[in-house]
Image (cartoon, grey):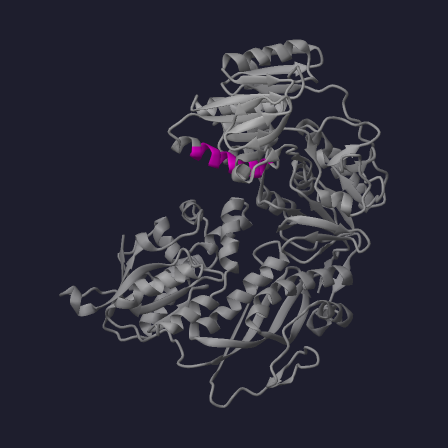
């Protein structure tokens, strides 16, 4: 038994903007006992707006100016859901997402930014060439396409930047620096003066800078349409235009107003001085998405940053029923406007200054801001769903007393839409149970497999998909058709409603894998514990011949269906040293089922097959060798073995999983073996979660099989080796059955 404090409240942050990034960092340094924190964002990282122009100008690369939300959530001990929010159910307190089940909350905070409104009509032919400056992540993706187009074009293209505020002017200067006169830039502004909120000296200084850089200014002009090759203005002026970038007045996501929250006249969340919704006090807002109705201020990054500290304090205070702080925005603020060429202009009130020293000042401020998110070490609470509590100990039982309550379990099962069991199931038809009885057909052999592991990611829904695929993979590797499963789940300590939500998210993920294959979840067992874990006992039936690990023959080619590297990447994630982009690609690979690959393998009558999991590629390959004639030699082409992005980099740093060294004990069967292992060789013993299939197919069929795998979505599938007769190597024959060829 263990003394713990269970999770009793759910705090959900929607959006990974500057304010929430600061909240997550402060939360990681001072977590709140009994509260589970969840971040929902439509991206795995978030750009820092202060460095955006420098990134466009080529001064900063992506890692320097992006906050890695996976790393930040790991530091904060938060769950992290990558998805797009489409609404809020205020009555049931649920966040509605595009691709996952609704997410329950007790307290909610919004920091989803804003999007410039393209008020002009855009012809369908050039729709992809009209680029809003926000969301910044989407802008930068389109900016890459714009640069590629200009690089391929034999003629000088025209780019119109619509909006003459700080954002438009700074972006125009940065783009001019990066494109190096390969495009002609136009700045279109509906007012007669640029930067109307700044003093006369700053306006004139920047207008002179634009003119000297031969950026055409079109002041007092309102863009109303983007047609192929030109931009039309209200005054009937036409401006040559291949691409348009819109840095105009921003709008809010429509779902905020549709949800029933109080908003201002532009649809932004209306908040009071405590950063609370004016209509729903359990909802907070910060950054561009929110408007302080009593003391409004510009929607600028400086205010989003300043919202962070009071938002953190007030979220904690609200959860503990303590007094809230009042946020008072500053009346004037400092703007440091980069010109893209190593200089900058400072503006505050009636003051202004320019020079290289201003840029060095701005660069130092921006790098210091980003540094606090780039050197994060996981806190002791990170990744744990419970905390030790000396002041209010709760004793959790072991044995059957640790089961999740019947009411909680029934609530979850009633919310799920699971495939019905086949008629052959004698027990499990009416309701899932700890045991199931079914009668398999007499002429079809039964295949059973079992697996279970702790969650390597802080997202029960996606973990459910990964775990289900991993557990079912053995059936696909044998050529069996899955029939039904029994589940074993460990749910973190918490109140009944918290545990219900965790179990629901987990089983919804599992069911997303089971339902398309018509696999019935017949029942199972739940238990409480410190960490989320899940496994399945899987039943399948053989339709025809079984695929086995043996039967390798000379002339066979070895095909691997998925890239390697999940072991080192998950180990790096646990140490907060994996980039979010690497982790997202690894998760997508683990969520990909081996079902289609197994069907293709059966169709081609492959000789042997296995799935690559905990023992790594070499461990499972040696199992195939041991089950085949002893006169065979396997030649592995190391250069052809696919690796997940970041896997080699992590192995180069010596980041390996706990099982890695044990897997490396196969060295006496491999030649040549390098010790210590080079990263490319270390990859071969990296333990895989929900890894791919390794199939042996006659050489003449390999190309056709590989093509069909690519068409089925296994884009990284590759021929990685060949099977030969050991005698073909001459005398003396190799001492090891596996030869590595670099």
| 491 horizontally vs 654: left or right | right
Q: Residue 247, image x and y in percent?
A: 62, 28
Toward which corner of the image does residue 295 lie, by quadrant? Answer: top right
On the image, the x and y values in percent for residue 202 come to 63, 12
Which quadrant does the N terminus fall into?
A: bottom right
In this view, the residue in front, 677 or 596, is: 596
Q: Is-magenta flag for residue 72?
A: no
Q: In the rendered view, would you say 400 is above or below 467?
A: below
| Residue lying furthest bottom | 442
State which quadrant residue 136 falls in: top right
Q: The magenta stretch spans which residues?
A: 136-149
Farthest left residue in view:
731
What type of secondary structure mainly makes up the magenta span?
A: helix
> Is 699 above or below relative to 386?
below
Point out residue 195 in the picture as x, y percentages from the top left corner. Answer: 66, 18
Residue that appears at 69% across and 45% down: 14
* In the foreground, 567 or 603: 603
Instruction: Judge whether residue 648 can be spotted in this image.
Output: yes
Circle count: 0
Q: Can residue 367 be spotted in the picture?
A: no
In the image, 311 versus 379, the foreground residue is: 311
Tell me if 223 is positioned left or right of 295 in this view. left
140 drawn magenta: yes
Of 229 and 661, nearer the camera is: 229
Q: Is residue 725 left or right of residue 490?
A: left
Image location (x, y in percent) of residue 362: 58, 21
Q: Is residue 558 above or below residue 52?
A: below
Q: Residue at x 66, y 15 (%)?
A: 192
């Amino acid at each position: 038994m263990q003394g713990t404090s269970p999770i009793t409240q759910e705090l959900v942050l929607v959006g990974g903007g500057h304010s929430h990034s600061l909240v997550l960092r402060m939360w990681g340094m001072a977590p709140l006992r009994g509260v589970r924190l969840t971040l929902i964002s439509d991206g795995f990282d978030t750009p820092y707006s202060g460095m955006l122009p420098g990134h466009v100008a080529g001064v900063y690369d992506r890692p320097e100016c992006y906050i890695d939300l996976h790393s930040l959530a790991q530091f904060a001990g938060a769950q992290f859901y990558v998805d797009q929010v489409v609404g809020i159910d205020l009555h049931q307190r649920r966040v509605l997402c595009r691709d996952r089940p609704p997410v329950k909350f007790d307290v909610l905070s919004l920091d989803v930014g804003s999007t410039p409104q393209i008020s002009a009509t855009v012809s369908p032919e050039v729709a992809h060439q009209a680029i809003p400056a926000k969301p910044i992540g989407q802008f930068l993706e389109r900016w890459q396409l714009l640069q590629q187009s200009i690089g391929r074009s034999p003629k000088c293209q025209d780019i119109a930047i619509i909006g003459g505020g700080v954002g438009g002017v700074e972006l125009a200067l940065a783009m001019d620096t990066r494109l190096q006169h390969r495009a002609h830039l136009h700045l279109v502004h509906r007012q007669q003066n640029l930067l109307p909120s700044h003093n006369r000296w700053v306006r004139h200084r920047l207008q002179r800078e634009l003119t000297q850089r031969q950026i055409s200014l079109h002041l007092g002009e309102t863009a109303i349409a983007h047609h192929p090759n030109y931009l039309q203005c209200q005054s009937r002026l036409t401006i040559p235009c291949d691409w348009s970038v819109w840095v105009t007045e921003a709008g809010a996501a429509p779902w905020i107003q549709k949800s029933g929250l109080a908003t201002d006249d532009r649809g932004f969340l209306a908040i009071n001085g405590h950063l609370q919704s004016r209509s729903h006090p359990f909802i907070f807002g910060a950054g561009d998405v929110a408007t302080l109705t009593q003391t409004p201020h510009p929607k600028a990054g400086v205010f989003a940053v300043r919202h962070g500290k009071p938002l953190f304090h007030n979220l904690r205070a609200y959860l503990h029923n303590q007094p809230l702080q009042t946020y008072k925005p500053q009346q004037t603020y400092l703007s440091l406007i980069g010109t893209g060429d190593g200089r900058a202009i400072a503006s505050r009130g009636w003051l202004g200054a320019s020079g290289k020293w201003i840029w060095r000042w701005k660069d130092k401020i921006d790098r210091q801001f980003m540094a606090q998110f780039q050197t994060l070490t996981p806190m002791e609470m990170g990744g744990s769903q419970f905390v030790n509590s000396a002041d209010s100990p709760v004793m959790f039982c072991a044995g059957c007393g640790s089961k999740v309550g019947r009411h909680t379990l029934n609530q979850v099962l009633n919310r799920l839409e699971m495939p019905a069991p086949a008629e052959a199931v004698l027990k499990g038809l009416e309701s899932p149970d700890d045991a199931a009885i079914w009668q398999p057909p007499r002429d079809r052999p039964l295949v059973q497999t079992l697996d279970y592991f702790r969650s390597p990611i802080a997202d029960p829904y996606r973990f459910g998909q990964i775990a289900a695929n991993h557990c079912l993979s053995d059936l696909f590797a044998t050529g069996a058709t899955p029939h039904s499963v029994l589940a074993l789940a460990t749910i973190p300590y918490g109140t009944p409603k918290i545990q219900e939500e965790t179990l629901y998210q987990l089983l919804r993920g599992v069911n997303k894998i089971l339902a398309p294959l018509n696999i019935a979840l017949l029942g199972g067992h739940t238990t409480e514990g410190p960490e989320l874990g899940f496994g399945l006992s899987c039943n399948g039936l053989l339709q025809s011949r079984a695929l086995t690990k043996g039967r390798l023959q000379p002339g066979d080619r070895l095909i691997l269906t998925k890239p390697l590297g999940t072991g080192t990447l998950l180990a790096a994630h646990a140490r907060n040293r994996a980039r979010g982009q690497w982790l997202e690609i690894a998760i997508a690979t683990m969520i990909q089922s081996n079902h289609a690959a197994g069907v293709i393998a059966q169709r081609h009558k492959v000789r042997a097959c296995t799935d690559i999991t905990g023992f790594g590629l070499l461990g499972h390959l040696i199992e195939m060798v041991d089950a085949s004639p002893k006169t065979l030699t396997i030649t592995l082409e190391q250069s052809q073995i696919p690796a997940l992005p970041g896997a080699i980099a992590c192995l180069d740093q010596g980041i390996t999983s706990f099982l890695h060294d044990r897997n490396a004990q196969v060295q006496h069967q491999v030649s040549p073996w390098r010790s210590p292992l080079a990263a490319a060789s270390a990859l071969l013993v990296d333990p895989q979660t929900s890894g791919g299939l390794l199939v042996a197919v006659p050489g003449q069929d390999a190309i056709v099989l590989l093509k069909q795998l690519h068409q089925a979505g296994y884009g990284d599938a590759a021929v990685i080796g060949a099977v030969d007769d050991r005698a073909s190597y001459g005398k003396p024959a190799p001492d090891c059955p596996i030869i590595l060829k670099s």
